[in-house]
Image: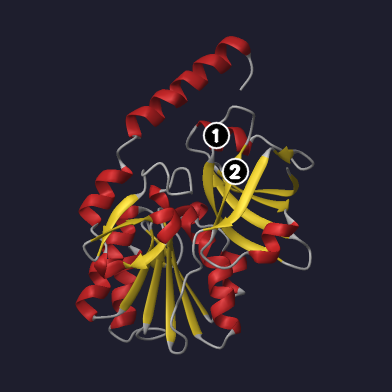
């Protein structure tokens, strides 16, 4: 079990939890994830480690309430226990040292940049984060991220905060020399369409780019095969071979199809949960 020590709403559907997990915190590295189970008989879901404090023995995870289990998790409060929390799993992200590293975050994927950019800044890299959302109210962890990088670039589709436009548009400007300047490497974490767009932006400029394929992950062990993807014409599994891969080698056509594979089943499970809740008054 992992006791919840802090709960903070980031958006109406996005919550940050700080949990007690000393063994996981002691071994965690940027880019890794944990598998969480909320109740007996419930599904196991992968969640990226947003940050960790080895001395305090705590982890930070960010949860977006989009499905049955994430909704159940979001109802837990400070003092409650998460039934199971296992990790760290996956491989740590490997970013070449030196130069200017730009992290691009979209949606709740921005949380994964927190510990990564902290580590890169600590080792002496020049760091920039480009953080995007539809509108100002959906930008998350801006204070935390500004404290772990040299430059924080905010982007909103509607122009309510920072640069008006997509993160890829601002990235293209940096590649051309604007603001903090051209990146030597890029790490993109967020929705599949955003990562695909970042990949095409950096491909033309021949800038080394890593993307996180954690949106594909299901069981976190490689046994289910749900996160199978082709990278450089080889079969890989996001959970055990990644979740970070060379973006320019990823078959995004396949990855996008796989990411949508269980949409109907996920919606059906959510509808059944809503129906049960309405009938019994319980989750």
Q: Residues within 10 Å of mark 1 (few under 14, many from 20)?
A: many
Q: Which residue is mark 2?
A: 36
C-beta proximity under 8 Å, tags 1 and 2: yes
Which residue corresponds to the image point at 49% horizontal and 64% vertical from the top-left? 91
**Residue 234, image x, y percentages:** 25, 61
**Residue 12, image x, y percentages:** 56, 42
The numbered disc on residue 185 is none
- Image quadrant of residue 218? top left
Q: Secondary structure at mark 1?
A: helix
- Specify whether residue 55 is in view: yes
**Residue 229, image x, y percentages:** 29, 53
Q: Is residue 212 above or below residue 39?
A: below
**Residue 131, image x, y percentages:** 45, 65
Q: Secondary structure at mark 2?
A: strand
The numbered disc on residue 69 is 1
Q: Residues within 10 Å of mark 2 (few under 14, many from 20)?
A: many
Residue 107 horizontal side relative to residue 3, left or right:
left
- Specify whether residue 149 is in view: no
Which residue corresponds to the image point at 44% horizontal and 57% vertical from the top-left? 240
How far apart marks 1 and 2 lie (CA) works out to 9 Å
Q: Is residue 79 above or below residue 205?
A: above
């Amino acid at each position: 079990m992992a006791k919840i020590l802090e709960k903070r709403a980031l958006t109406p559907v996005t919550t940050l939890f700080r949990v007690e997990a000393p063994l996981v915190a002691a071994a965690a590295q940027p880019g890794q994830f944990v598998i969480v189970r909320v109740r007996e008989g419930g599904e196991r879901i992968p969640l990226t480690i947003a940050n960790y404090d080895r001395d305090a023995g705590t982890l930070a995870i960010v949860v977006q309430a989009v499905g049955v289990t994430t909704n159940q998790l979001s109802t837990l409060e400070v003092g409650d226990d998460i039934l199971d929390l296992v990790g760290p799993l996956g491989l740590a992200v490997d970013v070449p040292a030196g130069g200017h590293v730009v992290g691009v975050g979209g949606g709740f994927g921005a949380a994964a940049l927190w510990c990564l950019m902290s580590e890169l800044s600590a080792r002496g890299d020049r760091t920039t984060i480009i953080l995007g959302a539809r509108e100002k109210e959906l930008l998350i962890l801006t204070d935390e991220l500004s404290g772990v990088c040299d430059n924080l670039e905010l982007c909103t589709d509607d122009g309510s905060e920072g640069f008006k436009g997509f993160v890829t548009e601002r990235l293209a400007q940096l590649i051309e020399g604007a603001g903090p300047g051209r990146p030597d490497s890029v790490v993109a974490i967020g929705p599949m369409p955003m990562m695909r767009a970042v990949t095409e932006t950096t491909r033309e400029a021949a800038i080394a780019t890593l993307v996180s394929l954690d949106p594909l992950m299901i069981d976190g062990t490689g046994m289910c095969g749900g996160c199978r993807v082709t990278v450089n014409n080889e079969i890989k599994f996001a959970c055990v071979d990644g979740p970070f891969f060379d973006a320019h080698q990823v078959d995004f056509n396949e990855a996008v199809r796989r990411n949508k594979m269980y949409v109907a089943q996920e919606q059906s499970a959510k509808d059944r949960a809503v129906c049960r809740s309405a009938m019994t008054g319980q989750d």
